[in-house]
């Protein structure tokens, strides 16, 4: 009898341990509503459908310092694939080593965006591709000179002709080629994405709890701005970043659209691979994902023109840890990318 009681007790404990371990280690299966976060096929404009020739040309141009005014900077100088396609700095370093006012945004998953740059002044990936080149404080490209350099290289001329027959080596074909390459910089294989595809072991229970807090309008309300499927609403919000010094600071979207609610408002960034792109916010003022969560939990810092969606959150320490764990589940598999051999 005594042996039976001991064995029964041991069996019950083992069963409880097994169930508890399962609950801790694995996320429940995704619901039909969760599938809204699954990324669709990459959209492409009708006049710039990607081909291998266009992507190859765009990749070369992306890494080619001859596209800058001093011949020493390329797109990859700031958008480094080893640093989450950003630069790891608080704010960007531009022409002549000058420190710029805004952080370098990643180009990851920008193929899905409808607004570009922190203030939304560019409306297509093609238009965005030329923006940093034409900015005197960034790459300071003299296109007459840069295009002349490209046209003097027979291998480049052949690449342009293969990619865009009859269109020549122009600003438009440079923009289209770089955009075609950037449309290949996609993260869709993170633990979160694999979980959406039915891999029940892809996310932990903690990461799943973080996802539920993230999407709960009464709890984290993160998805109000970082919405499905690419974790951005392509909108602009003042999230209460503390001003530095006197004055109004960086006016953000207001410089483009003179509406009072847009003062200090900036584009909602996507979050895939977010663990690789620290520091965070448009001024790099948050060093870690925990800092990001704490900022939102206290409802921002500068309340002067705060977006209505930014309010203090009732989050426990476990809730905050769960949110950070979920955001880390948005990191995809690291891909090997070789720097192309540039045409000489």
Image (tube, grey):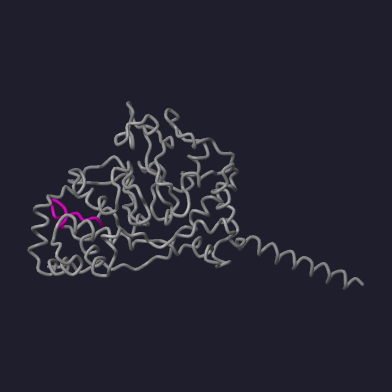
Horizontal and vertical percent for residue 296? 49, 40
Residue 264, image quadrant: top left
Which residue is at 43% across, 62% downward? 188
What secondary structure characterizes most of the magenta part? loop
Quarter of the picture containing the C terminus is bottom left
Horizontal and vertical percent for residue 223? 50, 47
Using the image as rendered, state which of residue 130 and residue 281 is in the foreground.
Answer: 130
Q: Tell me which segment is drawn in magenta.
A: 66-76
Hey, which residue is sitting farthest top in the picture?
246
Horizontal and vertical percent for residue 137? 20, 43
How many tags in the picture?
0
Q: Is residue 213 left or right of residue 327?
A: right
Which residue is at 29% across, 53% downward? 125
Quarter of the picture containing the N terminus is bottom right
Q: In this view, does 67 lie to the left or right of 59?
A: left
Hey, which residue is sitting farthest front in the picture?
46
Please say whether residue 69 is one of the residues in the magenta stretch. yes
Using the image as rendered, state which of residue 272 and residue 154 is in the foreground.
Answer: 154
Please say whether residue 288 is one of the residues in the magenta stretch. no
- 303 in relation to 209, above or below: above
- 240 in relation to 39, above or below: above
Q: In this view, does 13 lie to the left or right of 127?
A: right
Horizontal and vertical percent for residue 27? 60, 61
Hey, which residue is sitting farthest right in the picture?
1
Which residue is at 40% across, 43% downward? 235
Q: Is residue 96 left or right of residue 215?
A: left
Using the image as rendered, state which of residue 237 and residue 329 is in the foreground.
Answer: 237
């Amino acid at each position: 009898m005594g042996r039976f009681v001991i064995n029964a007790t041991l069996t019950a404990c083992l069963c409880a341990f097994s169930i508890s371990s399962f609950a801790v280690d694995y996320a429940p299966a995704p619901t039909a509503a969760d599938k809204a976060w699954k990324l669709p096929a990459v959209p492409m404009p009708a006049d710039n459908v990607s081909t291998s020739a266009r992507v190859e040309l765009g990749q070369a141009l992306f890494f080619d310092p001859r596209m800058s005014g001093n011949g020493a900077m390329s797109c990859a100088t700031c958008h480094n694939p080893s640093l989450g396609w950003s630069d790891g700095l608080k704010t960007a370093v531009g022409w002549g080593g000058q420190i710029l006012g805004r952080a370098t945004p990643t180009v990851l998953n920008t193929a899905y965006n409808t607004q570009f740059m922190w203030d939304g002044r560019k409306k297509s990936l093609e238009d965005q591709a030329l923006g940093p080149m034409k900015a005197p404080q960034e790459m300071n490209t003299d296109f007459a000179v840069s295009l002349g350099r490209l046209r003097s290289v027979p291998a480049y001329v052949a690449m342009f002709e293969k990619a865009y027959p009859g269109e020549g080596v122009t600003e438009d074909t440079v923009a289209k080629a770089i955009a075609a390459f950037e449309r290949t910089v996609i993260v869709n294989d993170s633990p979160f994405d694999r979980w959406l595809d039915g891999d029940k072991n892809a996310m932990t229970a903690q990461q799943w709890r973080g996802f539920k807090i993230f999407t709960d309008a009464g709890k984290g309300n993160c998805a109000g701005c970082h919405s499905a499927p690419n974790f951005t609403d392509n909108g602009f919000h003042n999230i209460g970043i503390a001003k530095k010094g006197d004055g109004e600071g960086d006016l953000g979207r207001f410089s483009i659209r003179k509406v009072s609610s847009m003062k200090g408002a900036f584009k909602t960034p996507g979050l895939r691979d977010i663990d690789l792109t620290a520091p965070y916010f448009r001024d790099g003022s948050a060093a870690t994902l925990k800092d990001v969560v704490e900022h939102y939990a206290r409802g921002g810092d500068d309340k002067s023109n705060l977006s209505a969606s930014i309010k203090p959150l009732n989050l426990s320490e476990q809730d905050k840890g769960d949110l950070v764990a979920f955001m880390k589940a948005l990191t995809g598999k690291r891909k090997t990318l070789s720097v192309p051999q540039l045409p000489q």
